Image (cartoon, rainbow, N blue to C red):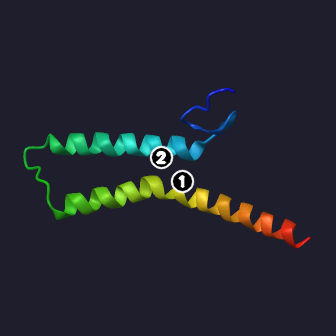
Amino acid sequence: MKKVGFFEEEEGVKSSTRLNSFILLAFLMLFDYLLSRMPAFKIDYFFIVFNFVMLLGVFAPKYLHKLAENNAFLTMLKAKKEE
């Protein structure tokens, strides 16, 4: 059995959604680091909400993609069961 890589859905099937999520997370972390180096930086309500919204934006597409896959799979199973 071959190991499945981090950016693969299953063996041999690459996941661009995972790659995009990883790249966006890396850019968010870099942005936060550069922002924290500014002299006037402070952790306030805006910073926390901004990061929360960005994290939702990073990981929501993968979650919604999985939900759509599971829903399509369940619909297919129901159709086969009715036959």
User: Mark 2: few, some, or many residues within 10 Å (few <14, many ≥20)?
Assistant: some
Image coordinates of residue 31 in percent, x first then y, are 28, 44
User: Mark 1: few, some, or many residues within 10 Å (few <14, many ≥20)?
Assistant: some
Which residue has dot 2 on it?
Answer: 21
Image coordinates of residue 7 in percent, x first then y, are 56, 37
- Judge by depth and name the residue closer to the eye, 21 or 35: 21
Helix, strand or loop at label 2? It is helix
Amino acid residing under circle 2: Ser
The numbered mark at residue 73 is: none
Which residue has dot 1 on it?
Answer: 62
Q: Quadrant of the N terminus?
A: top right
Q: Quadrant of the C terminus?
A: bottom right
Mark 2 and 1 residues: CB-CB less than 8 Å, in contact? Answer: yes
Residue sitting farthest toward the right: 83
Q: Is residue 44 left or right of residue 65?
A: left
- Judge by depth and name the residue closer to the eye, 76 or 19: 76
Helix, strand or loop at label 1? It is helix
**Which image quadrant for residue 78?**
bottom right
Q: Residue at x 67, y 58 (%)?
A: 69
Which of disc 1 and disc 2 is earlier in sequence?
A: 2
